[in-house]
């Protein structure tokens, strides 16, 4: 009798234990978090120290000459230290070789597309300033430069720009920063003038 009572008590206890687990959701581990990124207020200044062109850039940017090309005075980097990012700008003089420069841009984009999930491009046409070109956006975790562009007056000047981060970016987590810097690149393009 005592044995039967023990079995009944154990069965009852196990039954209550199972019933208490019911259909409640089990706790799941929290997803990996990302650091909060504080985006500074946008105030722009004119960069007019380059021989062949000028444009507006945010106050938090620092203009440096490209250390890998000391002889190219019109090759600069627009550094954004708080984002560990920079926009590399290269200038070339057009002497009947615009097609060659456009082919170089196409080759660079094709190299990056191997890692991209997709690409969007936008034409740039500003006849008042004689600024023509294209802005290319690439999506994907392995893309080294999510934004590239080129600008030309089609007769004398050609500028290529590319946004780079000084670390391996995870574009999913960096998308707010990329979108924020896209506004700066748009401002740069919309205020771009040849000298």
Image (cartoon, helix red, strand yellow):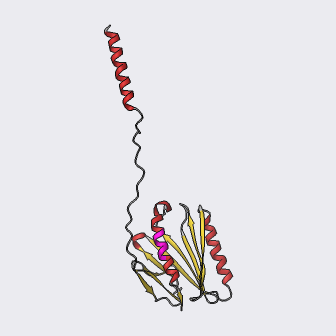
- Please provide percent x and percent y for residue 134: 60, 77
* Residue at 35% in and 10% down: 4
Of residue 68 and residue 128, the one placed in the foreground of this image is 128
Q: Position of residue 86 (x, y in %)?
A: 47, 74
Q: Quadrant of residue 82?
A: bottom left
The verdict on residue 180 being magenta is yes
* Residue drawn at (35%, 19%) of the image: 10
Residue occupying the far top of the picture: 1
Q: Nearer the viewer, residue 126 or 69?
A: 126
**Looking at this rendering, what residue extends furthest in the bottom direction?**
195
Residue 38 in the image: x percent, y percent? 37, 67
Q: Is residue 103 left or right of residue 58?
A: right
Read off the magenta span.
179-184
Q: Residue at x 44, y 86 (%)?
A: 46
Does residue 14 appear in the picture of this structure? yes
Which is nearer the eye, 29 or 114?
29
Judged by its main secondary structure, the magenta piece is helix
Q: Position of residue 99 (x, y in %)?
A: 68, 81
């Amino acid at each position: 009798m005592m044995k039967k009572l023990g079995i009944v008590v154990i069965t009852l206890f196990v039954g209550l234990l199972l019933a208490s687990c019911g259909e409640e959701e089990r706790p799941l581990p929290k997803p990996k978090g990302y650091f909060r990124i504080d985006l500074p207020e946008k105030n722009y200044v004119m960069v007019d120290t380059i021989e062949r062109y000028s444009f507006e850039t945010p106050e938090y940017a620092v203009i440096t000459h490209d250390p890998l090309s000391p002889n190219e005075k019109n090759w600069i980097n627009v550094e954004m230290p708080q984002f560990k990012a920079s926009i590399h700008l290269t200038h070339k003089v057009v002497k009947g070789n615009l097609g060659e420069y456009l082919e170089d841009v196409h080759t660079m984009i094709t190299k990056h597309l191997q890692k991209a999930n997709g690409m969007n491009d936008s034409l740039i046409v500003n006849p008042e300033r004689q600024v023509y070109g294209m802005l290319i956006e690439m999506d994907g975790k392995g893309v080294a430069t999510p934004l590239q562009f080129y600008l030309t007056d089609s007769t004398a000047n050609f500028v290529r720009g590319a946004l780079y981060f000084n670390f391996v970016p995870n574009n999913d987590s960096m998308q707010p920063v990329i979108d924020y810097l896209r506004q700066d690149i748009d401002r740069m393009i919309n205020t771009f003038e040849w000298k």
